[in-house]
């Protein structure tokens, strides 16, 4: 999955700094598509929806585990994309930008639900619990379904304690499997900055987990 | 966490085992916690068999939603959120109160203005002094006239006696 970061330390000093050509998001195929949407070309917007709908769906489903909510939130994501695309500044890739909107929409949804734990349990039990129980026989050492739910709940709570940017970065790294190098290309930041941001996010998660344990 | 680990944390989390990790309990424990979190975050991937395709007509439903929502305006923020609505109501109430205050205070200010204007009539004749002084001067002169009449009256009556 990773492996592209090699032996680069951070903060980078001297020999560690490799000059990489920056990805030019202003002159890509995506950028042309965005410009067409900005010029009110509806077919171009349709192309964006068709190109990214599977990705958006799978991000939402991964976080919420509920197909009906995934459809609703995906619609909301693309509506937001439609209204905000005029402000897209080409500093990052379109996918990174859409990814961020999608994760934010999921967290907005979770915030609105408030009774988070109950929601997860009921939603999960409808679609996944049976499948999970059926596909994973109760062998020694296997994590029980309710423990998994509690762990999912915990990590979502912890991720709500970091900034939008940090959350997007760590999810793109660990869930989507992008390397530091790829993330640098997608976000327009340099690799060293990505590494520092990822490290700070991981530390924040540790601290948040510590606080949560003390409260409990 | 020590620099030896911190500088290579992404590699360490990907499986590399620097010597320092075996020697330092603090770093080892932190790395272990980070690995646990990483494993939990990876659980947020959609499952293998999940078909990430929306139902047919997804684009049409997106466009319907876009048409229903319309462009986001600053008014939508006030109208749609309960907090925004409260702010809007409070602002309107404040504006009404201010309006009422301004109207009533202007009316009460108009009365003395007329009085001063009336009193200022002789000012043009008298000179550049303030209106109060002019009024005072007028009062003093009229009062002086009446007292002068009284004295003359007394003298006349004294002579008659």
Image: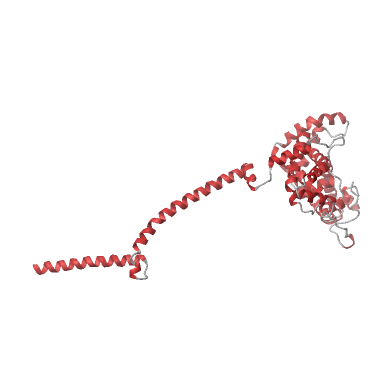
Which color scheme does this rendered protein use? secondary structure
Find residue A88 and report its horizontal and vertical position in percent: 76, 51
Q: Which residue lies furthest to the left in this view?
A: B161
Q: In the rendered picture of this protein, how many numbered marks are placed on residues?
A: 0
Whether residue B157 sits left or right of residue B120 in the image: it is: left
Residue closest to the eye, B117 or A135: B117
Q: Is residue B44 above or below residue B107?
A: above
Confirm whether residue A206 shows in the render: no
Q: Nearer the viewer, residue A24 or B70?
A: B70
What quarter of the picture does the C terminus of chain A occupy?
A: top right
Residue nearer the viewer, B96 or B3: B96
In the picture, residue A12 is in which quadrant?
bottom right
In the image, B78: left or right of B30?
left
**Rendered image quadrant of residue B50:** top right
Residue B104 lies left or right of residue A58; in this view the side is left
Camera-side residue of A202 and A98: A98
**Residue A146 seen from this side:** yes
**x%, y% of residue A79?**
74, 43
Q: Which x, y percent locates residue B114?
A: 37, 58
Picture coordinates of residue A209 (x, y %)? 76, 44
């Amino acid at each position: 999955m990773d492996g592209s970061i090699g032996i680069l330390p951070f903060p980078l000093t001297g020999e560690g700094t490799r000059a990489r050509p920056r990805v030019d998001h202003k002159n890509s195929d995506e950028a042309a598509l965005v410009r067409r949407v900005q010029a009110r070309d509806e077919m171009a917007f349709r192309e964006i929806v068709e190109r990214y709908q599977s990705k958006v769906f799978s991000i939402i489903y991964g976080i919420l585990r509920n197909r009906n909510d995934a459809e609703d939130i995906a619609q909301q994501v693309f509506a937001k994309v439609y209204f905000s695309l005029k402000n897209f500044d080409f500093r990052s890739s379109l996918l990174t930008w859409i990814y961020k909107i999608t994760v934010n929409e999921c967290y907005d949804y979770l915030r609105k639900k408030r009774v988070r734990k109950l929601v997860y349990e009921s939603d999960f039990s409808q679609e996944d619990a049976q499948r999970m129980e059926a596909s994973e026989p109760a062998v020694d050492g296997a994590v029980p379904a309710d423990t998994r739910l509690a762990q999912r709940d915990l990590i979502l709570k912890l991720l709500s304690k970091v900034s939008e940017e940090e959350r997007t970065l760590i999810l793109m790294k660990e869930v989507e499997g992008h390397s530091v190098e790829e993330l640098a290309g997608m976000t327009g930041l340099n690799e060293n900055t990505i590494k520092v941001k990822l490290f700070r996010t991981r530390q924040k998660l540790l601290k948040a987990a510590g606080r949560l344990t003390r409260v409990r | 966490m020590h620099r030896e680990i911190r500088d290579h944390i992404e590699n360490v989390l990907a499986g590399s085992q620097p010597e320092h990790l075996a020697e330092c309990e603090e770093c080892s424990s932190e790395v272990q916690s980070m690995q646990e979190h990483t494993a939990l975050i990876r659980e947020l991937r959609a499952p293998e068999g999940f078909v990430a395709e929306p139902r047919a007509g997804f684009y049409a439903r997106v466009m319907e939603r876009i048409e229903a929502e319309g462009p986001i305006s600053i008014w939508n923020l006030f109208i749609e959120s309960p907090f925004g609505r409260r702010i809007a109501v409070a602002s309107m109430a404040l504006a009404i109160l201010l309006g009422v205050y301004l109207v009533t205070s202007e009316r009460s200010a108009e009365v003395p203005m007329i009085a001063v204007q009336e009193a200022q009539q002789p000012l043009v004749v008298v000179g550049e002094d303030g209106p109060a002084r002019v009024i005072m001067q007028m009062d003093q002169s009229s009062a002086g006239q009446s007292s002068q009449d009284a004295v003359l009256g007394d003298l006349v009556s004294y002579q008659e006696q």
